[in-house]
Structures are given as C-alpha cells and as structure tokens.
C-alpha cells in the first residue's frame, strides 16, 4: 500500500482541532439547541400531516410531475419542516450577529436540502434496497462537500492501494466502479424491459423465439454495461486476465450446475422442444409451462402449485410434451364386465357413450375392443380423441360415469372378486378346540 502515515495523521489532527474549536464556542450550544427544537417540531408536524392527508387522493387532478413532487414532499414532511425552520433560524442569526456564529445552522440547512433533493430523485426507483443504498451514498457525499472535506476524503480513499499486476486497486476506484455499475445496470434493466415488451407484442414470433431474443438482449446489454462501467473508471480489462484461470476453475467446480442449467436453457429455446404454454409431464408432475427462466422452467399444475424444474433435467431426462406438434390427444379407458354380458353389445355401448361426449372429435369415431378373457371377467379398452389435453381426467370421468349408467340400463354388471370356501364331508379338515372362558 502507498499510504503516507504522516499525511493521514495530519488530516486527523486538523479535523480534531477544527471540531474542538467549534464545540468550545458558546454559540455552538445555542445552534445545537435550535436544531433540536426544529427536529422536535418537525416530528410533530409530520405526525399531524400523516393523520390528516390521504396519500392516495392527494393532488389527484394535478399534472403528473407536480403530483409526484407534492407526494414526495408530504412523505418527507419532517425533513421539509426541519429544513425550513433551520433556514429561518440561520437568517435571523445571520443578521443579528456574526455569520460564523450560525455556521452549524447553515450546515444543518444544507444537509436537509440535500436530503430532500435526494428523496425526490430516488423516488423514481422501485427497488427498496437500491433506494437506500443510493440515498445514503449520495447524502454522505453531499455532507462531505458541505463541510468542505470532500477533497480530503477523496485523497484519503485514493491513498490506500493494492497493486495486482497492472491494476492499482483503491477504495475510491471500487466505489466509483460500484456506482457506475449500479447506474449502468439500472439503465440496462430499463432498456431490456422496453425491448422485452416490444418483442412480446410481436405476433410474428413464436413464444420460444421471443424468450430466446429477450435473453440474448439482456445478456448482451449486461456485458456492454459492465465493459463501459469498468472502462470509464480506468480499469483495463486486459489487467483482469490474471484472474481468468481462477474464475474458470471456480465455474468448473462450484458453478457447474448453474452453467449447465444456463446452457440447457439456451438449447431448449433454440430447439423449441418445449415452449411457454405447452402441457408437459415430467416425472410424476403434469402441468403447463408458465415461464422459462435462465436456470429453470415453471410448470403450473393447475391446483395452485408451480413446479420449478431445472433446465438440465429437461435436456437429460424423459419429458412428455402433450402439445409438441399436435394438441389432439387419445384418451384410453380400460374397463371390464362379467361373462353374462354380450361383448358385442358392450363394445357398441362404450363407443356410443364416448361419441356422445361434447369434447369427443366427430371426425375420429371412438373404438372399443375386447382385450382379454380374465379370471374375474372380460376386459375391454375404449379409445377416443379429444382436441386438447386440458381436462383429460375430467373427460375420462364423464365417459366412465355415462358408461356406468348405460350398463345399469342394459343389466350389464361389472365384475368384482368373489371367493367360495367349500367344506368336504360336512366338517372342517382340521380339528379345532374352542375354549369357553369361565
């Protein structure tokens, strides 16, 4: 590190002397008391405003920029009232005594105004964590600038350095790179969301192509944003080549599943084997694909559950896609009757029952065949086509209930297991003794 210990010591001593001189002045306590009084009044004013103002209907008919400004000011009522009171106190003391005796009030007023400006600018952001991070960082920079210590703080942050190859890494460089990356990623998110909305509104593209284009645009914009942000702060990307080997090892060992799922997602989007809206069966789970992400797909089961299936599983395992090339679905129903029934009549009743269902396709007549003479009765198979696999279990249930009613009308019985025990010679083959309790 190239930190000069003497310069740092002098900076600390100068700051301590300045703070000590300010605290030793009797005007400091008067200003401090006025600031505390302004803070108490501001807190009470905010409580009164929040209890009397409805934020949902506030300035509803005003223009959008003005309405937005008013709502931010009302939500920051304590800061606005505090700043106003401190400014008034500063003006009064400025004209009543020496300007240096109201220096603390001036600092407090500027800090309040800075916080109001930051609240107004960050109100357009939606992420709570980003809002807090940007607000605190911007206010710290403003505070250092107001007290005249920004240049000293910048020099101090730039004095610590670690040299890695051709890269000089300092806290100041890290802060600048982080801030630029944050801004670049925010702009990238806005641009990618705009591109996604335009792509999704295009009817000429299939859902899988739309998802693929959106992913390519997001990845491309992200890479461009990182390169621009790092290049702006003066980081030579070639200096990072030292870490490429370590990064490759890390990806190969610790991130291989993530990389495999990412590549599998690209393959699925490219070959169109599954796409949003398809009805699929993966293992024991059946449902429609509701979303395809970088790492997984979301399968909605229809009962409120969603299965998150890794992309790698769709590439390496067996997947049943009910709507891959054709939505027409063959419904199969197995049933049985006893030997007293006429098998030809049974086949006829089954075919007529299936054909009467409203979802059965008229151009493909149902088919019923006798498949087996079993021990308990005759077994049959009924097949018919429906136009869409949605609700296939309900269709099967409707047809089986209708078939049951038809069997009842014709006197056809469904077999069930019956066991007979015959006793030869009128006695049990083994002697038994029954003990009767006293």
Image (cartoon, rainbow, N blue to C red):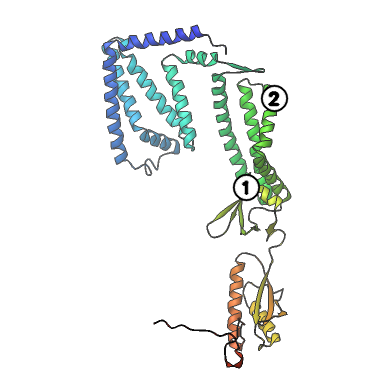
Q: Earlier in the sequence, mark 2 or mark 1?
A: 2
Would residue 92 be seen by someone viewing this image from the given angle? no
Report the front residue among 304 and 5: 5
Q: CB under 8 Å between callouts 2 and 1?
A: no
Q: What is the C-alpha distance between the residues marked 2 and 1? A: 31 Å
Mark 2 residue crowding within 10 angstroms, few (<14) / some (14–19) / many (20+): few
Give residue 41's mark: none
Question: Regarding mark 1 in the picture, which secondary structure is present there?
Answer: strand
Report the front residue among 360 and 157: 157
According to the picture, the residue beneath numbered tag 2 turns out to be: 241
Image: 433 above or below 229: below
Measuring from the top left, give residue 160's x and y in whole percent.
Answer: 54, 15
Quadrant occupied by the C terminus: bottom left
Question: Regarding mark 2 in the picture, which secondary structure is present there?
Answer: helix
Q: Quadrant of residue 98?
A: top left
Measuring from the top left, give residue 235's x and y in whole percent.
Answer: 63, 21
According to the picture, the residue beneath numbered tag 1 turns out to be: 296
Q: What residue occupies the far bottom of the structure in this picture?
A: 425
Measuring from the top left, give residue 224's x and y in whole percent.
Answer: 65, 31
Report the front residue among 388 and 344: 344
Residue at the (66%, 67%) spot, across then down: 387
Query: As drawn, is 430 to the left or to the right of 347?
Result: left
Would residue 202 be seen by someone viewing this image from the given angle? yes
Quadrant occupied by the N terminus: top right
Measuring from the top left, give residue 87's x and y in whole percent.
Answer: 32, 21
């Amino acid at each position: 590190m190239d930190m000069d210990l003497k310069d740092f010591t002098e900076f600390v001593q100068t700051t301590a002397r300045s703070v000590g001189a300010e605290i030793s002045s009797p005007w400091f306590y008067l200003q401090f008391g006025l600031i505390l009084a302004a803070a108490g009044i501001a807190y009470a004013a905010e409580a009164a405003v929040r209890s009397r103002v409805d934020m949902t209907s506030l300035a509803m008919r005003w223009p959008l920029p003005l309405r937005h400004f008013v709502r931010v000011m009302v939500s920051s009522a304590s800061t606005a009232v505090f700043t106003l009171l401190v400014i008034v106190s500063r003006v009064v003391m400025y004209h009543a005594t020496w300007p240096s005796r109201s220096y603390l009030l001036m600092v407090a007023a500027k800090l309040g105004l800075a916080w109001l400006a930051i609240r107004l600018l960050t109100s357009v952001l939606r992420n709570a964590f980003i809002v807090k991070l940007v607000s605190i960082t911007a206010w710290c920079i403003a505070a250092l600038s107001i007290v005249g210590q920004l240049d000293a703080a910048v020099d101090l942050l730039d004095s610590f350095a670690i040299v890695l190859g051709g890269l000089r890494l300092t806290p100041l460089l890290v802060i600048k790179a982080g801030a630029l990356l944050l801004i670049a990623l925010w702009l990238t998110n806005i641009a990618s969301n705009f591109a996604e909305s335009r792509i999704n509104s295009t009817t000429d593209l299939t859902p899988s192509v739309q998802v693929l284009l959106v992913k390519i645009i997001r990845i491309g914009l992200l890479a461009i944003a990182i390169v621009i942000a790092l290049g702006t702060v003066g980081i030579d990307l070639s200096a990072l080549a030292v870490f490429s080997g370590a990064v490759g090892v890390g990806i190969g060992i610790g991130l291989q599943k993530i990389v495999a799922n990412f590549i599998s997602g690209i393959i699925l989007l490219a070959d169109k084997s599954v796409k949003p809206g398809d009805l699929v069966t993966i293992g024991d789970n059946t449902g429609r694909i509701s979303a395809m992400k970088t790492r997984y797909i979301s399968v909605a089961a229809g009962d409120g559950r969603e299965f998150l299936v890794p992309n790698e599983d769709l590439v390496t395992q067996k997947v049943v896609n009910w709507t891959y090339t054709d939505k027409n679905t063959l419904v199969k129903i197995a049933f049985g009757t006893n030997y007293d029934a006429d098998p030809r009549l049974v086949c006829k009743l089954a075919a007529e029952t299936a054909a009467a269902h409203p979802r059965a396709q008229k151009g493909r007549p149902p088919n019923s065949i006798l498949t087996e003479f079993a021990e308990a009765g005759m077994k049959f198979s009924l097949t018919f086509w429906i136009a869409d696999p949605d609700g296939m279990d309900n269709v099967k249930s409707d047809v089986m209930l209708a078939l049951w009613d038809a069997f009842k009308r014709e006197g056809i019985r469904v077999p069930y297991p019956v066991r007979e025990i015959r006793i030869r010679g009128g006695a049990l083959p083994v002697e038994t003794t029954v003990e009767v309790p006293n």
